[in-house]
Image (cartoon, coloured by chain):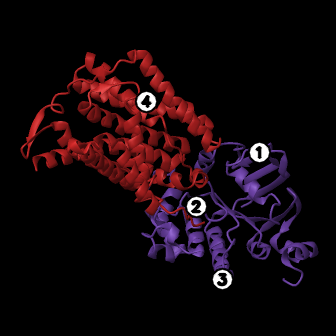
Chain colours: A red, B purple
Amino acid sequence: MEYVISVLLSGISVGGQYALIAIGYTLVYGILRLINFAHGDVFMVAGLMGIYFTATLPFGEAIPLVIIVTVLLGFTIERAAYKPLRSAPRMSVMISAIGVSYLLQNTATYITGGQPMTYPVIPVLSDTVNVAGTQTKWVVIITPFLVLVLIFGLTQLINRTKVGMAMRAVSKDFETSRLMGIRINSVISVTFIIGSALAAVGSVLFFTNYPAITPTAGAMPGLKAFVAAVFGGIGSIPGAVLGAFLIGICETIIKGLPSSWDVSVFSDAFTFALLIIILIFKPQGLFGEAATDKV
Amino acid sequence: MSEQVLKIDNLKVRYGGIEAVRGISFDVKAGEIVTLIGANGAGKSSTLRTISGLVKPAEGSIIFEGEDITAKDPTAIVSKGLMMVPEGRRIFPNLTVLENLKIGAYLRKDDLEKDIEMVYGYFPRLRERSWQEGGTLSGGEQQMLAVGRALMGRPKLLMMDEPSLGLAPIVVQGIFEIIRQINDAGTTVLLIEQNANMALHVADRAYVIENGMIAMEGTGKELLEDEKVRAAYLGSSSS
């Protein structure tokens, strides 16, 4: 029983961390119809910055600084690599995104020398706590709540504010949005800023639990988060969050099965198989819109 | 009332190598309804899209209230009080009716309550449906919403691209009635239409566009009575 609880707890926690990354994919896709392949690497860079900044600054300053610099990075990537290609075919932008992804990975290799870097022990988050008889880190408990608070804030922003309304409008119709006076590029920048900020928060939570960061450390969580976004119906925020929690829990359960079954090494394959099965029955994902735009 | 609101001089628009608009000049005076009529592909839509800043002209100038707005971006043009009702209505299907109205006032920072009431006054149906998503409205209601949305920007000049397109005749009549009311309330209107009969009846002045050039101009009444216009655009039997 205790074992089951601990597996579930860590599954929910991993899911929450994926959710924070997945929102960045789904928001950008919703507006630009672009799979931002660099997003997982932005997440990795945020992790590395967490290491470097906490080495010289107190945590209370280092972590906000990680978020700010990650936001600047996301903003700059969009302006430098995607905006000039706004009227180019979507495939070109995607290739640009792949290029940025490699640029970030290679730069990380250059700076770290390719060595796995140890993520700092962050007070409170890394402390252990006893829940229902199982030992776990505070980050596991805090993550789902923090994720829910952030998502609540984000949905309020999107549904209640003027910039949120503009984001929803732009996601449907660039040209008419311009006729309303909306500056498309500002709205797109806001999208990247939100996605990057959430990825930065996600990096602190994620790497506290998985302490070593390599230059490719963003690839797998990024891919899983992307899958979560597709699974939930890309473009949909609730979908991405639900998808992320499902994938996190599923993968942790498979990893936690008795070792005599010898399946834990296949946890990623099982997760993807599940995804494929669901997409066969719901090709648009859980909350995806059917592609029927009434004109 | 004869102050010039909009003055287009020798406007040329090219897409790739094709010249869609080949040197159009016309003007719109304060308080008027001016219509551009012409066949599909004559260059009417390109002209409006260029005025609203969506398309950059190859040559020519666009003067709005004495200010050169040629090739300015749409945000700057909207902020000067020039709103467009786009072809095909293009309401935001995922926004509620009320949000669609509010987004028409995107650049405004003042209170919108009075304007929303004004729009609901013109189109009571929109009030009933204010919480519905735009995409659930019928074609006629969407056209009302598109007009209401543009009015929310408090336009000095309202441009309408084919408001009758795809609507039932009775709905079209309603829309034109509203256009006249909006104009009576002081908004200058530039209308492009394939439905020349309706457009000429409502317009103070009209221009006929053929192959990207102005072929004829006159008051709505003059053109309604013109033999060539009747033969080409009204069908010889209509009056």
Disc 4 marks which amino acid?
Answer: Leu
**Real-space Cα distance between discs 3 and 4?**
55 Å
* Residue bearing the label numbered 4: A72
Mark 2 in CB contact with mark 1 (< 8 angstroms) = no
Name the residue located 13 percent from the left edge and 31 percent from the top edge.
Answer: A127
Secondary structure state at the residue bearing disc 1:
loop
On screen, residue B95 versus residue B235, left or right, reads left
Secondary structure state at the residue bearing disc 3:
helix
**Real-space Cα distance between discs 3 and 1?**
37 Å
Which chain is indicated by disc 4? A
Mark 3 in CB contact with mark 1 (< 8 angstroms) = no
Evaluate whether residue A71 shows in this view.
Answer: no
Residue in the foreground of this view, choosing between B210 and B206:
B210
Residue in the foreground of this view, choosing between A18 and B36:
A18
Residue in the foreground of this view, choosing between B58 and A205:
A205
Disc 3 marks which amino acid?
Answer: Ile
**Real-space Cα distance between discs 2 and 3?**
22 Å
Which chain is indicated by disc 2? B
* Residue bearing the label numbered 3: B170
Disc 2 marks which amino acid?
Answer: Ala
Name the residue located 40 percent from the left edge and 54 percent from the top edge.
Answer: A232
